[in-house]
Image (cartoon, helix red, strand yellow):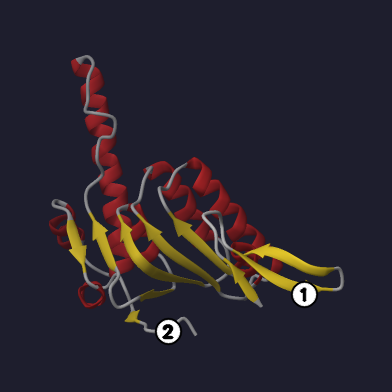
């Protein structure tokens, strides 16, 4: 098996009955029940991950799925959609932090049944932010946006508290400011399980 290196998604060459066939590495990983969460979390990436999770659950509801995460986070609504599917399907999900799992990327990581971090990876959590350059509009519109933000903060704090077994007060103390965790710090806070040096 040889690897093709290019700026596009890497491919491997497999010998089949039809000759040599290039296969995207992501497809090969998917056949091993491994999926990737990289880049910004938005509706497109959420839809892709949800489809993959549901398909793997359909193929074998009892086999573990591995999700490799290296994401800066993104849209809360898209992240919650992925999170809800992770919690709903019957498969156990192993999450692996392969660089930086930040914001909702960290939330998805800590929602895994088994949560592993590479030695130099990091997690980052914070309160939800207003995107798009700030709030503008009437006083009533500003009030509504602030209420939505507080509601989102409560939802995320409850999720983090659930998966860390920490109180809401402890979680709020960490998310009021941007907080980074080394693997050992993440284990101590309850949002990771172990540090790994091999994927095998």
Residue 108 visible in the shown view? no
Residue on which the image places disc 2: 198
Q: Is residue 7 above or below residue 134?
A: below
Q: Is residue 47 above or below residue 9?
A: above
The percent position of residue 56, horizontal first and vertical second, equals 64, 65
The percent position of residue 6, horizontal first and vertical second, equals 54, 59
Q: Given this view, does label 1 or label 2 mark the residue nearer the observer?
A: 1
Residue 162 visible in the shown view? yes
Write down the quadrant of residue 190 in the picture. bottom left
Residue on which the image places disc 1: 15
Q: Nearer the viewer, residue 70 or 188?
A: 70
Q: Residue at x 28, y 34 (%)?
A: 131
Question: Which residue occupies the extreme right position in the image?
Answer: 17
Judged from the image, the secondary structure of the residue bearing numbered disc 1 is strand
Instruction: Specify the label residue 107 is tagged with.
Output: none
Q: Residue at x 36, y 45 (%)?
A: 74
| For residue 24, side relative to residue 39 (left or right) | right
The percent position of residue 18, horizontal first and vertical second, equals 86, 68
Q: Is residue 98 above or below residue 79?
A: below
Separation of marks 1 and 2 at Cα, in angstroms: 27 Å
Rendered-image quadrant of the N terminus: bottom right
| For residue 35, side relative to residue 144 (left or right) | right
The percent position of residue 124, horizontal first and vertical second, equals 25, 59
Q: Residues within 10 Å of mark 1 (few under 14, many from 20)?
A: few
Q: Nearer the viewer, residue 141 or 177?
A: 177
């Amino acid at each position: 098996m040889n690897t093709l290196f290019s700026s596009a998604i890497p491919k491997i060459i497999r010998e089949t009955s039809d000759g040599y066939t290039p296969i995207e590495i992501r497809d090969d990983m998917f056949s091993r029940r491994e999926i990737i969460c990289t880049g910004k979390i938005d509706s497109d990436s959420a839809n892709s991950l949800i489809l993959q999770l549901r398909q793997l659950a359909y193929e074998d509801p009892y086999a573990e799925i591995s999700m490799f995460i290296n994401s800066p986070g993104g849209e809360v609504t898209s992240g919650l959609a992925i999170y809800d599917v992770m919690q709903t399907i019957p498969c156990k999900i192993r999450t692996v932090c392969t660089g930086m799992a930040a914001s909702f990327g960290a939330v998805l990581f800590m929602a895994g049944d088994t949560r592993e971090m590479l030695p130099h990876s990091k997690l980052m959590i914070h309160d939800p932010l207003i995107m798009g350059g700030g709030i503008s509009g009437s006083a009533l519109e500003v009030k509504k946006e602030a209420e939505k933000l507080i509601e989102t903060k409560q939802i995320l704090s409850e999720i983090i508290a659930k998966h860390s077994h920490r109180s809401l007060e402890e979680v709020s103390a960490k998310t009021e400011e941007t907080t980074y965790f080394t693997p050992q710090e993440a284990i101590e806070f309850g949002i990771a399980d172990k540090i790994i040096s091999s994927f095998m």
